Image: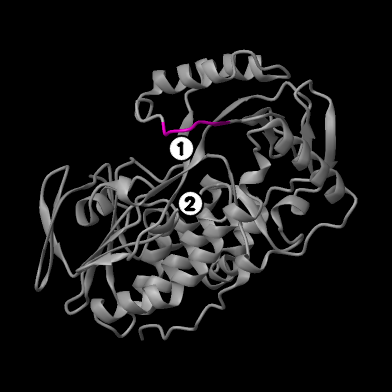
Amino acid sequence: MTRTDQPAVRTAGRRKVLISGASIAGPTLAFWLHRHGYEVTVVEKASAPRSGGYPIDVRGTALDVIEKMGIMPRLREAHIDLRRLTFLHGDGSEVTSLHPHAVTGGVAGRDLEVRRGDLTDALYTAVRDDVEFLFNDSIDTLDQHEHGVDVTFHGGGSRSFDMVFGADGTHSRTREMVFGPEEQFHRYLGYCFAVFTMRNDFGLSHETVMWNTPGRAAALYAVGDDDEVHAFLNFALPDPPFHAFGDLAAQRDLVTEVFADAGWEVPGMLAALRDTDDLFFDAVSQIRMPRWSGGRVAVVGDAAHAPSFLTGQGSSLALVGAYMLAGSLAGRDHVDGFAAYEHGTRDFVTLNQELVGKGGATLFPVTAAALAERNDRLRRLSAMPPKQGRPAHSALTLPEFALAT
């Protein structure tokens, strides 16, 4: 196990909590729990905060969380200025080209788009001197009882905490230990996707180009003038490919098979897929749970309510959910705090998850007729000014929670 250079100093009388996961929801929750007077430990199976990664959006209410954390200036400097989104027919000819906000409902000059690693690094930097981080480790067992939660770690050793939080992603191990198998909460949306980086030999700059045929999409995403682009391959599949999860070779074989006869730049993308060392593959899905807490354990972020990339709201929901969870616990025991977390946050989460049915999934039609209809809609959008935000993104006004003195 490795820790930060300045591990937290244990203080008598402070409630001790453990957070599993150091991506977005975990460090955000740690930041706010510390400010509400908790002694916080974060355990992360990776050896350090993950750098790099594909671009993510921060919109609406989540921007207020970023402002309150004092990291907005740093993220503004890291902002990706994506200027153009071009859609192509299957033969490579252009459907239309438009500003990305026309599709996403973003607000120019306010919304953020940054590399995932830039956000996680900013969050980690904001909290690393105040809480304890245990890298290269994970929770092995949880044993809840009247007075707390006894935890054993995969790397050895055990500790007791007043509460434990799962911020360990869509496939959360913490959630599985407390609430049962993922299948009961997993809502598959009919697609799988692969993301990886490759050389930018296309002359692309600050733009995304997306090729579509029914049930398949391929995109090249140039976040700037770099010599790399993010390659994206998305395809419809009736059932989740369980055989491919956790099997890198099976993932490559599946994607290659689906796109074997594809045109445009896809053959080169498949060649790069074979050699890439940063492939991320998953099903397009949501996590929907009837409750986000059990006893002294609660889940947050994608572990509680992954909305899928079709909504563009995964990172934003993680930021808002962590802020609301920490604030709801301020001055309350875990029973009342978890109830307040649910009461104050669920409607916002549900509204954003439902963006899938209000345009998100329609970017990837599975029939020729639906694809033609989508293309007509995009052409009409290109003649209109960009939208000025979706109500769902800002549907929650952040409450002010009293901080510990």
* Disc 2 versus disc 1: nearer the observer: 1
Residue located beneath label 1 in the image: 283
Q: Residue at x 62, y 20 (%)?
A: 269
* Magenta range: 235-240
Quarter containing the N terminus: top left
Q: Nearer the viewer, residue 117 or 102?
A: 102
User: Element at badge 2?
Assistant: helix
User: Element at badge 1?
Assistant: strand
Q: Please, is residue 254 above or below residue 126 in the view?
A: above
Q: Nearer the viewer, residue 93 or 67?
A: 93
Task: Tell me which numbered mark, 2 or 1, is placed earlier along the sequence.
Answer: 2
Amino acid type for the residue under numbered disc 1:
Ala
Report how far apart the C-alphas of labels 2 and 1 lie in the structure.
Answer: 23 Å
Q: Residue at x 53, y 39 (%)?
A: 53
Image coords of residue 84 (percent x, y): 80, 42
Which corner quadrant of the image does residue 378 belong to? Answer: top right
Image coords of residue 329 (percent x, y): 32, 78
Q: Residue at x 62, y 70 (%)?
A: 394
Which corner quadrant of the image does residue 241 belong to? Answer: top left
Colour scheme of this structure image? Answer: one colour
Callout 2 crowding tier (Cα within 10 Å): few <14, some 14–19, many ≥20: many
Residue located beneath label 2 in the image: 120
Q: Please, is residue 5 above or below residue 126 in the view?
A: above
Q: Residue at x 10, y 54 (%)?
A: 158
Residue 66 painted magenta: no
Q: Nearer the viewer, residue 87 or 79?
A: 87
